[in-house]
Each structure stands twice: as C-alpha cells, then as structure tokens.
C-alpha cells in the first residue's frame, strides 16, 4: 500500500471506529485480566499464610505436649519432607537469639527481624513478613509466632513455585491480550466497513450524479436503520433538486419562448418605423407602442419572479389582519363595470366581515386574476358568481364560478402551469401566468386552488385559504 493510501486510510471513519473499538476492547480486557491476576495472587498468598499458620499451630501443640526437643525433631523432618529449599523452621528465644533450626544452608541470608519479636512480646498475634533476598528473584513469606513460654518460631516458605505460575500466567495474559486485540481490530474493521457500506453507496451515487443523471437514486435496503434513513433523506433531497432543476429548465424554456414574442414585436415596430418614411406623429405612435410592449414585458417578468420566489418558498408575504370579505367585495365592485360592458351578471355573496391574516396586496392579485378570467372566458349574457364562506376549521373558501367556455379535461391539468394558455384562449389577451400566480399566492397562504369545469357550461375555481 502506498504512503498516500495509508495516510488516506488513517483519515477514514472506518479506521477511527476500528481504533476506538480496539482501544475500548483492550482497556476492558486489561482491566478484567488485571482483576483476575490480583485475585489469583491474593488467593495464593492467603493459602500460603494459612499453611504457615497451620505449621505454627502444630508446633505450638507439639511443644506443649511433647516438649521443645520433639518440636526440633519434627522441624527437621518437615523441612526435609517439604524440601529444604522450600521451607525452613527456626526456634528463637524471646531475646531473638536462635537456638535451633532446620537445615539453613539455603536460607543463610534470612535475618531475624527484632522489631517483629518486640511486637510479639508485647502481645501481638503472629506477624507475617515478605522479603526478597538479593540475587533471588522470588519472594519468601515468613511467619513469626510464640509457640511456647519464651519460645518463638520463625517459619518461612519460598514463593518460587507460585512466582513461576504467576510469570507463566503473565506471559499467557500478554499473549492473550495481544491476540484478542488483533482479533478485535479485525472484527472492528469488518463491522465498521459493513456499517459504513451504506454511506459509501451514498457517496458513490453522489459522485456519479451529474446534471443529466439526476434521476439516479441510492439503493435503500429494507432494514430501516440510520443508514437507510440517510439514504432515504438523500434520495428525497435528490428528488427536490431534480424538481428544482426541471423547474429552472422549464422557466428558461418559457423565457426563451414567451419573451421572444414581445421582444420581436418591439423590434418589428421599431424596424417598420425606421424603414418607412415617417413623420413626428408616427414616431410618437411607435414610441407609445414600444412603451406599452415594454410595460407588458416588465409586468410578465415581475410576475414570473413573484411566482418563482413563492414556489421556491422565499416569497415575502406581508401578512397582517385584514377583512377578507371587504377585499372580495371591493374586487367585485372594481370588475362590475367590465362585466356589465360584456353584458354579464355578477353576483357577490360574502359575510359582512371576515377577519383573516394574510397579504392584502397578493390576495387582491389572486382574486383579480380569477375574476378577470371568469369575465374574459364567459360570453355575453352569462353570469359570474363569487361566494366567500368561513369553513368549520377556521379556513376560508372562495369560489368563483362562471357560465363560460369551460375547460376540457386534457387542458384542466395544465392551466396552472406557467405560460400555459388554452387553445381557445390564444385569441384573447393574456400571458398564461395568471393562474400560476394565483396558485402560488394561495399556497403561500397555506391553501390551494382547484377547478371543476364542464366544457360549454362553465367553470368553478375553488380557493381554500
Ligand atoms: P391567461 O388567462 O392569461 O391565458 P391564465 O393562467 O389566467 O392565463 O389561464 C390559463 C388558461 O386557463 C387560459 O388560457 C384558459 O385557457 C384557461 N382558463 C382560465 N380561467 C378560465 C375560465 N374561467 N374559463 C375557461 N378557461 C379558463
């Protein structure tokens, strides 16, 4: 593996997780085995102490029944039976001077601890001592105790055998911990890689996604764990981005297509004026036409921007407490002359007062667009009805019905799209933005617009707010 790959590997989450896993495992293994080691040494020491106390009790009763001589004899036999390098006995006067012992050739360096003898004389129970002789690496456990009047027994036992057991145990312990750590690292690495495989799938998909491959999705397993949740969220986010990009594409296509017409018209007017012999009044007419076209263009652009901002969720609504009934009544009065000019009856049914929190300006645009359409697409003699009601759950419902041309089912699914104009409507004035703006405003107010229509009979637009 190259150095760069090694450095990259060290930065991976899988590597860090493995390190943590191995570290925690090592600490737990170390603590457990140390505890076990302490317990084992403690048990060995307690057992040794018990053996020494047994010896002491035995010599105490022997001396009491058979005298010191018997004790001395038994000491020699016991040390030979147990091994002269393993156990020794030394009989002392109460001043600390030795008067008899087992074979002490091996134990020559064992001194007599006078301070312990003083403690015994002052009534302390048998006293233990642990010493290590120079040039011998194992411990010797020694017990001092009074076994008769003026007689003290110093009995010692080599811990060499136990030391050997402990050192074997230590070697096994280090070997086991090393082996377990290697195993833990292996298992940890495998588990981390397995757990993070979902993350890698997300990364791979993200790397493969380009502008034209936005339909790619991360495969989601049915486990329902955090990784699947992340993959689902990532897929949902991709869906939203795909929709946004499609929206942007549609918008740019619309701009290219629908703004071309007025610009071409403006250019045409200017060109005709330039190529024909013109005088002052014709120039004035041309300028007026250009201003009119520019105003329409500006209006279209600003409407498109408002729709885009609302659809992207960043449109700024100036919400305030308003009388929605008043707003609807004002709009009806504003459009009444237009309806009457077209010989349409206009009926407006609203409560006296309906209090609502919303953006008055935007709601006015919504109502105007729907009313304008109703009047525009209803032939003379028809009727337009506006009804505003409060619903039980505190929502508002505004319906604008007409007895006009109606909308074919195939067209009804498109009428809320930007720049969409029905086939029949192309001869009438309009931009195809009115309904998209109305729906964007309704949605920004937490509502929506739906339509029910029958071609030839009329349409009913229902706005919920
Ligand atoms: P515009 O009215 O400028 O064409 P809109 O977005 O307001 O654009 O409407 C989109 C299309 O929906 C219209 O072109 C028309 O075909 C249809 N439409 C809207 N309102 C009505 C209505 N009240 N009756 C019949 N058709 C309608």
Image: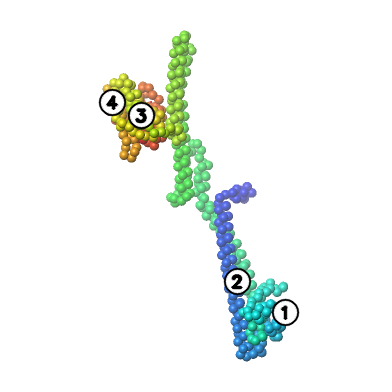
* Mark 2–mark 4 CB contact (< 8 Å): no
Tell me if 452 is positioned left or right of 20 in this view. left
Identify the residue at image location x=44%, y=20%: 293
Q: Badge 2, how many Cα within 10 Å: few under 14, some, many 20+? A: some
Say which label, 1 or 3, has the lower sequence index: 1
Q: CA distance from mark 2 to mark 4?
A: 104 Å
Tell me if 10 is positioned left or right of 282 in this view. right
Say which label, 4 or 3, has the lower sequence index: 3
* Mark 2–mark 3 CB contact (< 8 Å): no
Q: CA distance from mark 4 to mark 3?
A: 21 Å
* Mark 4–mark 3 CB contact (< 8 Å): no
Q: Badge 4, how many Cα within 10 Å: few under 14, some, many 20+? A: many
Identify the residue at image location x=45%, y=27%: 302
Query: Which residue ends up furthest to the bottom in the rendered image?
Result: 66
Say which label, 4 or 1, has the lower sequence index: 1
* Residue 150: image location, x then y, percent: 66, 85
Disc 3 target residue: 327
* Residue 197: image location, x then y, percent: 51, 50
Q: CA distance from mark 4 to mark 1?
A: 130 Å
């Amino acid at each position: 593996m190259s150095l760069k790959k090694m450095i990259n590997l060290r930065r991976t989450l899988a590597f860090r997780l493995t390190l943590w896993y191995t570290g925690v495992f090592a600490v737990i293994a170390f603590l457990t085995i140390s505890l076990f080691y302490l317990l084992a040494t403690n048990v060995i020491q307690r057992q040794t102490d018990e053996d020494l106390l047994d010896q002491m009790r035995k010599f105490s009763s022997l001396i009491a029944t058979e005298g010191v001589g018997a004790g001395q004899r038994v000491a020699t036999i016991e040390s030979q039976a147990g091994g002269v390098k393993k156990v020794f006995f030394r009989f002392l006067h109460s001043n600390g001077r030795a008067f008899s012992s087992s074979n002490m050739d091996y134990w020559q360096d064992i001194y007599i601890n006078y301070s312990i003898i003083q403690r015994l004389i002052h009534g302390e129970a048998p006293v233990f001592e642990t010493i290590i002789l120079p040039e011998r690496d194992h411990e010797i456990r020694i017990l001092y105790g009074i076994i008769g009047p003026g007689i003290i027994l110093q009995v010692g036992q080599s811990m060499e055998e136990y030391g050997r057991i402990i050192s074997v145990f230590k070697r096994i312990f280090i070997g086991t911990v090393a082996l377990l750590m290697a195993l833990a690292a292996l298992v940890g690495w495998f588990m981390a890689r397995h757990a993070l495989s979902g993350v890698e799938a997300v990364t791979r998909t993200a790397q493969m996604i380009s502008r034209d491959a936005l339909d790619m999705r991360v495969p989601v397993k049915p486990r329902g764990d955090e990784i699947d949740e992340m993959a689902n969220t990532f897929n949902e986010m991709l869906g939203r981005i795909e929709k946004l990009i499609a929206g942007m594409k549609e918008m740019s296509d619309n701009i290219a297509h629908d703004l071309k017409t007025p610009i071409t018209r403006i250019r045409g007017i200017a060109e005709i004026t330039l190529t024909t012999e013109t005088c002052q009044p014709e120039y004035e007419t041309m300028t007026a036409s250009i201003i009119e076209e520019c105003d329409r263009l500006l209006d279209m652009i600003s409407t498109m921007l408002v729709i885009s901002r609302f659809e992207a969720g960043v449109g700024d609504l100036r919400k305030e407490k308003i009388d929605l009934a008043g707003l609807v009544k004002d709009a009806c009065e504003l459009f009444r002359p237009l309806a009457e000019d077209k010989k349409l009856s206009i009926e407006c049914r609203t409560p006296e007062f309906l209090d609502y929190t919303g953006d008055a300006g935007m709601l006015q645009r919504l109502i105007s667009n729907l009313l304008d359409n109703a009047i525009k697409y209803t032939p003379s003699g028809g009727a337009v009805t506006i009804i505003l009601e409060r619903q039980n759950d505190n929502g508002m419902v505004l319906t604008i019905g007409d007895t006009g041309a109606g909308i074919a089912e195939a067209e009804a699914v498109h009428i809320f799209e930007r720049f969409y104009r029905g086939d029949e409507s192309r001869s009438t004035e309009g931009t195809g933005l009115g309904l998209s703006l109305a729906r964007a405003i309704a949605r920004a107010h937490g509502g929506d617009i739906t339509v029910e229509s029958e071609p030839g009979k009329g349409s009913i637009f229902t706005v919920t707010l």
